[in-house]
Amino acid sequence: MMPQWLEMFGRIDRRIIYLAIAAAVALPLIFPLNLPLAITKNSQSIFDRIEALPESSSVLIAFDFDPTSIPECQPMAIALVRHVMKRGLPLIVYTNYPETGPIADRILENLAKEYNRTYGTDYVNLGFKPGNDALLLSLGSSWTAPFPNDQRGQVTAGMPIFQHCPNYRALSYMVDIAHGATVDFYITIGLAQFGVPLGVGVTAVNVPQYEAYMQTNQLTGMLGGLKGAAEYEKLVGKDGKATRGMDAQSVAHIVIIILILLGNLSILPKWLQKRKSRAEGR
Amino acid sequence: MKNNLAILLCGLCGLVIIAAFFLNSPVTTRMQDVLTEWVIVLAGFSYLMGGFSILISHSMRISRRAESWFYSLVLISCLVGMASLGIFVDNGPNSLFQWLFANVQNPMQATMFSLLAFYVTSASYRAFRVKTWLATLLLISALLVMIGKVPIGEIIWSKFPIIAQWILTVPSLAAQRALLVGSALGLIATGLKTLLGIERSWLGR
């Protein structure tokens, strides 16, 4: 006979659950556990791609996320920009979200100072323009026609960075850091029509969807959620917010699993009683 | 007549984009560029229309003193205030506009999304119950993926990440592919129907 007190595990107050998850997230951020992190093939392949690019190969990083996804996407963006700037490859940045131009600007400015890169020559932030897939089609002919001015309001025509890379087709590699469906039109237009190899950084919830394109080799690599960002931080040799966040995510997952198991333990007495009465009825 | 002209224009524009995709000639590419420039301009106007629409609907709520009209007032003040700062004052990297955006808008949006962690935990606790064998299957898969996708999972048992990856790349992906192929076929059918003038809901009927 199972003890009836097990049933109380099914009635845990939601405020206790909220407190438990808050503690599970906050405590590892205050007292890091420094859990070891293995690098997955999907992250390694983006790193290897960028590492293998010849000098002066232009790279595009699209910042297709807004503040809601900053915890997952911003560390990816920082690690990727760091890698491209460290290698000294020309870097073009733009976004399909109106909120993200200034976010990209701050990241680029900080890292450009660190690696002594010049705006307009080594990197540029084109900012936001509406149009999504229509904009991408347009970029196939020119960067400067749809973006006559950049995020800072400077005139883009004549910028040295566009001399070797006048349009999207001339890119050597492209990474879309996305929290939505923008990846789809980089696959259908950027990759299929313009032939530019593509890697992506997506939020954890989107990983199963884009795993299909990894298997068909349409994507050269994929950073998946905070873990993907943490892996890339390890690859570029500079731990950041994602690495610290992985401890919090680990503990939070354990807490959720424990709560789910407790919830199921609570229905055990009822289930056993039902089974017993069914056996007696027979 | 007016409708037929719109359908004809829509079909022609669609054909130009399709031709540019397959032919890759300078003529079709130039035509595609002109069309996409128009789309970008139109998309810009949609933002303007959205702004006006918000302004009008919330102004009406305030004038009617509708329920929670005060929030409409806050919304309009913020909309007009931020737009004025950006357009008439300065929107450069060190401007008040950017400061407000980085220190008010960004944290607010991030906070709203962060609340999901609490709701998802509470919902998982209540919903993931072993009631049928299908629910059990879902529960076991979810637990394995959750534990296999974080570093602590590998410390507990080195096979957890491999099992989690297998769940994601075999059974889960099979279902994902079915969805992808299904939606792609639906998209092609809808596209063709629109280009041929069979689908006319975009005309407002």
Image (cartoon, grey):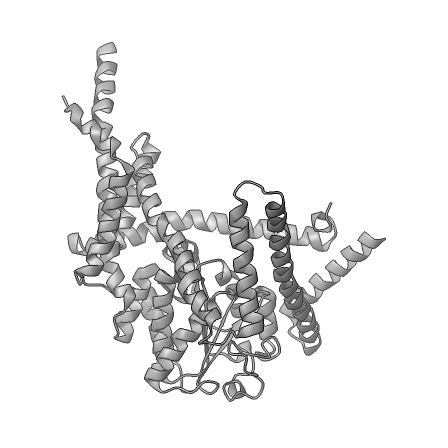
Q: Residue furthest right?
A: B1
Which residue is painted at 44% across and 50% down in the image? B176
Q: In terms of depth relative to the viewer, which is nearer, B180 or B127? A: B127
**Residue A156 at what x, y percent from top left?**
56, 83
Q: Position of residue A88 (x, y in %)?
A: 38, 85
Q: Residue at x 34, y 77 (%)?
A: A82
Residue A271 image position (x, y, % from top left): 24, 24
The answer to whether residue A211 shows anywhere in this view is: no
Question: In what quadrant of the picture does the N terminus of chain A appear?
Answer: top left
* B178 to A132, vertically: above or below: above
Taking the view exactly as shown, the residue that stands out farthest to the top is A281
| Residue B186 appears in the rendering | yes
Indicate whether B52 appears above or below B100: above
State the residue at coordinates (48%, 85%).
A120
Residue A108: image quadrant is bottom left
Left or right, residue A244 beside residue A111: left
Kindly indicate the quadrant of the structure image that contains residue B100. bottom left
Q: Is residue A277 left or right of residue A145?
A: left
A281 and A161: which is toward the camera: A161
Q: How many marks?
A: 0
Nearer the observer, A50 or B104: B104
Q: Residue at 17% across / 60% down in the picture?
A: A31
Residue A179 image position (x, y, % from top left): 44, 59
Quarter holding the C terminus of chain A? top left
